[in-house]
Amino acid sequence: MVQYDRAGKPFTVYYPLLTPMLLKEAQKEHRTTEEWIEALKAQESPLAVAKQARMKIALRTLRRAALFALTLCLARVRAQAPQDRYTKYEYMIPQASGQ
């Protein structure tokens, strides 16, 4: 990394070699940090695992409630639709005026 003169004193630094070396060290540090993060994720506390399970159950319950509410709304719309000579979906098609 350092070039010395004839007297043995430092003369200059090989700067082109410095950038790859620093990059290698930064990548090594990044890998170490990523390994620590993965280790922490693997050591999740039982409380965090239980909380995550409760959240999944709550989300599933909310999805079911939303589906049930949509089903009720659809049933009400179908019940209010005209039932004479039209098919059950024709009431959604707008009629052209002036014919």
Image: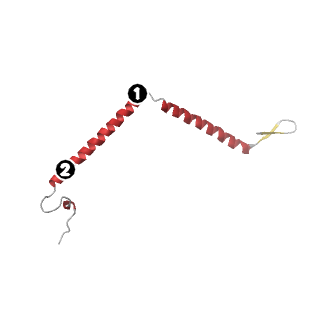
Task: Give residue 88's position: percent from left, percent from top.
Answer: 18, 58
Q: Residue at x 41, y 30 (%)?
A: 48
**Which element type, helix, strand or loop, lies under badge 2?**
helix
Q: How was this image coloured?
A: secondary structure
Going by the picture, which residue comes out furthest to the left? Answer: 84
Q: Report which quarter residue 89 is drawn in.
A: bottom left
Q: Is residue 70 above or below residue 42?
A: below
Q: Left or right: where does residue 55 sit relative to residue 28?
A: left
- Quarter where residue 96 is shown: bottom left
**Residue 41 x %, y %:** 48, 33
Please tell me the numbered disc located at residue 8. Answer: none
Q: Is residue 17 left or right of residue 29?
A: right
> Residue at label 1?
47
Residue drawn at point x = 44 percent, y = 27 percent: 45
Residue bearing mark 2: 75
**Residue 15 falls left or right of residue 31:** right
Q: Quadrant of the C terminus?
A: bottom left
Q: Toward the viewer: 87 or 96?
A: 87
Dot 2 amino acid type: Ala
Label 2 Cα crowd, 10 Å radius (few <14 / some 14-19 / many 20+): few
Counting residues from the N terminus, which is met first, the one under dot 2 or under dot 1?
Answer: 1
Identified at 46% across, 30% down, the residue is: 44
Label 1 SS: helix
* Residue neighbourhood size for the residue with mark 1, other residues' Cα within 10 Å, grouped as few (<14), some (14–19), many (≥20): few
Q: Where is residue 59 in the image (x, y as percent from the top left)?
A: 33, 39
Whole-Å distance between the Cαs marked 2 and 1? 42 Å
Cβ–Cβ under 8 Å for marks 2 and 1: no
Residue type at numbered disc 1: Leu
Q: Quadrant of the N terminus?
A: top right
